[in-house]
Amino acid sequence: MPTPPIADRRPVTTLRHGETFVDDYAWLRDRDDPAVTGHLEAENSYCEAVLAPTKELQERLYAEMLGRIKETDLSVPYRKDGWWYYTRTEEGQQYGIHCRKAESMEEGEERVILDVNLLAAGKPFMALGGMAVTDDGWLMAYSTDQTGFRQYTLRVKDLRTGELLAVERERVTAFAWDADDATLWYAVEHPETKRSHQVWRHRLGEPDDEMIFEETDETMNVGVGRSRSREWLLIESGSHTTSEVRVRRAGSDDAWRVILPRVREREYDVVHHHEHFYLRINDTGRNFRLVRLPVAGGTLADAEEILPHRPDVMLEGHEAFRDHLVRHEREDGLPHIAIQRFRDGAVHRIDFPEPTYECYPGANPEFDTDSYRFGYQSMVSPMSVLTWGMDSHERTLLKQHEVKGGYDASRFVSRRIHAPAADGTLVPVSLVRRADLPEDGTAPCLLQGYGSYGYPYPVLFSSNRLSLLERGVVVAIAHIRGGGELGKPWHDAGRMASKANSFTDFIAVADALTEQGVVAGNRIAIEGGSAGGLLMGAVVNLAPTRFCAVLSQVPFVDVLNTMSDATLPLTVGEYEEWGNPELEDQFAWMRSYCPYTNLERGAYPPMLVRTSLHDSQVMYWEPAKYVARIRELRTNDAPLLLHTNMGAGHGGASGRYDRLREVAMDHAFLLAVLGVEGHLAAAD
């Protein structure tokens, strides 16, 4: 193998709660130091050199994945204010083209309202944050990020002429038009902490904007939006555990007023329907109940309960339409859509046939409708867009994502099993394999996980994943504690002082897959990103010989140092997920699992660690320091690779073809180490 780059050791000593810490690689934080970029570039060159034997495999994988994509395609149009909106892609173009037609798709003339390819010209990165059109249909606000730092610039376009208005606002996180078609409300983030903290009002033609609201609680972020009914504007303040909503009638000069004052550890969100606000609130239980209040106002004591708290069903969200209330629920780890008729309270659920799947809201901008659009997919069923007759109960398939190359879903099998954790808790596992693959304990496996923030790991279809499945790799998702698969209590059981449950759950899933003969115990590769990268680092420290390869994407691995620096973006708001290291007991639990802090001398499995120079969520230096320290401590010479995208952010490459290149590299690394294809060395 080529000689790996060795980072200089420049010790920085800190004292925390009586313990002395020496960080030899803290200097990698200085992005402006030429030695830092030089080191990252050297790591990139080393990564490419080590993976050179897989270059042919990477090209083959890229061709396979590209060959499954319908490059020139059209999204399912949706109707709003007499226009049909849709997005199309063209072969060879990296980004989508946003369009609309008047009256009908068949007879209307296409009008391109935003071509992201033109915005991206000459730039290494481009991401569209959001779009909003005025009620009259002629002005469009949109936001873009051209660095990957998730810092968006707001602009306004006249759709009659195609010209940009003299409106340009930086660091915008959310925005909404008022009913007068001339007032734009927008939220902005703090330039240093990236916390969304202020809401401003801009009136077209006026030189100065007015700040309307400032959120002073450093744990809270603020956003602004408009109800589907269009009758109300909303300002939402929220942390990981607490929320508060302000409202103002659209098109009025009314003062903003609070629906319910904030109470620590109480969350609620609001939708409007005629004379009531419907609140999803967790005041009587962690899994939320549903109540309503008159729009005229009232206290929680005045609220009418529509749906009580249920300990075994998580109410994840709700939407209001003219005649129906749509509830998004999760029971036994599986998502459901329940529809309630306002007239008589009758409730029904949309049924889904597979043992593990994902369903989610589609484009439903209009309030006055009895048709509900939603998305559905599973690990074997490609993404579909469907509508449901909320009165007729009729399901209509509008489009199923086409997988080119003759994809046959019957060749694959997905199912769900449960793995017993050390304390007896049953952890759900979703998995997919080739149908003819014997379960004889010999199959290689890619095990994925996340387990943070109460986010359920989505059980999605991936045409890219087919390149692994076709080669006999079993892909499994560990729905560990810390996620939201089994409601808020599942999240609570894997955060703060209980965070270690996430890590032991993940190892228990690997053990169960082995013991049940689903996969070979010595051929399990693992993958996680962001907080899932923390998971990767923690389980490798706990069981360094358990896994044969690690793919770690933008990993949050320097927990103790990052959470001890309140000047970093997002840190203070994260105290409710991880803890505040200024408090000795909370410092102690983070100290016990922080991947970077707990690295020790010994053998480490093959690793490919990815990061991006402009990542605003997990700074590039965390994975860079992590890899440098493993190089210092490891006693074997298994591949240890760091690859930094020098022109992207937390999500990696923004262009769809560039992104495929990244996935091809990742899969080539995994297949080589798993011994399926290629010839990288495994761990000693």
Image (cartoon, rainbow, N blue to C red):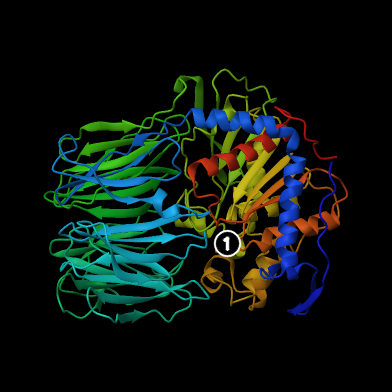
- When asked about the image quadrant of residue 22, the answer is bottom right
Q: Position of residue 442 (x, y in %)?
A: 70, 25
Left-right relation of 55 to 466? right
Residue displayed at 44% across by 34% down: 378
Left-right relation of 404 to 622? left
Q: Position of residue 237 (x, y in %)?
A: 37, 72
Q: Which class describes the residues within 10 Å of circle 1: few (<14), some (14-19), or many (20+)?
A: many
Q: Nearer the viewer, residue 122 or 657?
A: 122
In this rendering, is residue 85 above or below 179? Answer: above
Q: Taking the image as drawn, is residue 268 in sight? A: no
In this rendering, is residue 677 above or below 286? Answer: above
Q: Amino acid at mark 1?
A: His
Left-right relation of 420 to 442? left
Q: Which residue is mark 1?
A: 614
Name the outermost residue toward the right. Answer: 635
Name the outermost residue toward the left. Answer: 343
Check the picture and name the quadrant holding the N terminus.
top right
Residue displayed at 31% across by 34% down: 351
Q: Position of residue 681 (x, y in %)?
A: 81, 36
Left-right relation of 344 to 214? left
